[in-house]
Image: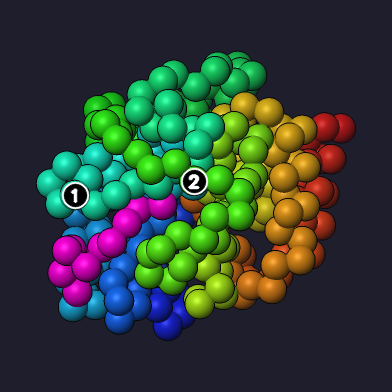
Amino acid sequence: MQLAPGLYRFGDDIVADHLIVTDEGITLIDAGLPRLYSALRHELAAIGRPITDVRGIVLTHGDSDHIGFAERLRRELGIPVYVGAADADRAKGAKPPATPSDHKRLIPTLGFLGYALLKGGARVPKLKEVQTVSDGDVLDLPGHPEIIAMPGHSPGSIAIHVPSVHAVFVGDELTTRNVLTGVTGPQPAPFTDDQATSSESLNRLQDLAVDWIIPGHGAPWTGGAPALITAYRQAESAIRS
Ligand SMILES: [Zn+2]
């Protein structure tokens, strides 16, 4: 689905990935769950570009619902995979720390896990090799993605700012649709390692002049960074109280 010239989305509002499409090639942002691979092929066919046009995959973080088919593309086609340095081990299979659990969330958690299983989430091939990126890096990939460190959800979480399409991809540093509750609107994401740090990282979006703020789960936000941060803070304080 085309969001804007050069900016495409596939998957759904539970798990989505994105393509930056230029004359020089394509950058893939996140690699979903393994079975989103067929959605990628479908999207590329719809826009008439071969998969060999994909020059690189940039991961917002190393969680298994974002790396799904990345190793497959790396292994089969030699496409490099970029990840925040502090998430390299996680992308290669290190277990994330257990996040605070809440028994009231057990049933919705099982619901999301059921969805993930349908999309191949039980067997996510871990990355054998990654290129690590750091705050301030500008990658030599289509769209020239700029890396903004956004620790919190995981230590190596990054936002990926792509000025050519007026978009920033924020992974799970926030969500606009909680995968556990189905509640929509900007809010803290579940399964976050360190919520206080995640909340602080959000301030880094404040001055970005972008049309699109795109989380890994939930609809893209088009209301600008200041309004997004305000809505997030309201949701965050409602959770706390
Ligand atoms: Zn996720």
Q: Residues within 10 Å of mark 1 (few under 14, many from 20)?
A: few
Quick check: 7 above or below 206? Answer: below
> Which residue matches tag 2?
133
Residue 1 visible (yes or no): no
Residue sitting at 19 percent across and 74 percent down?
49
Quick check: 202 above or below 227? Answer: above
| Picture colour scheme | rainbow
Residue sitting at 26 percent across and 63 percent down?
54
Dot 1 and dot 2 residues touching (CB under 8 Å): no
Q: Foreground: 226 or 186?
A: 226
Residue 86 visible (yes or no): yes
Q: Quadrant of the N terminus?
A: bottom left
Answer with the quarter of the image where residue 5 lies: bottom left
Q: Residue 82 location, x and y as percent?
A: 40, 47
Magenta residue span: 49-58
Answer with the quarter of the image where residue 137 lies: bottom right
Q: Foreground: 27 or 85?
A: 85
Q: Is residue 240 left or right of residue 51?
A: right
Callout 1: SS: loop
In space, the residues marked 1 and 2 are separated at their CA atoms by: 18 Å
Q: Which of the labelled discs sits on residue 33, or is there none?
A: none
Quick check: 232 above or below 199? Answer: below
Answer with the quarter of the image where residue 241 lies: top right
Residue 104 falls inside the magenta stretch: no
Q: Is residue 169 left or right of residue 3?
A: right
Outermost residue toward the left? 76
Residue sitting at 25 percent across and 36 percent down?
120
Q: Residue 11 location, x and y as percent?
A: 35, 56
> Which residue matches tag 1?
78
Q: Is residue 162 left or right of residue 123?
A: right
Mark 2 or mark 1, which is nearer the start of the sequence? Answer: 1
Q: Amino acid at mark 1?
A: Gly
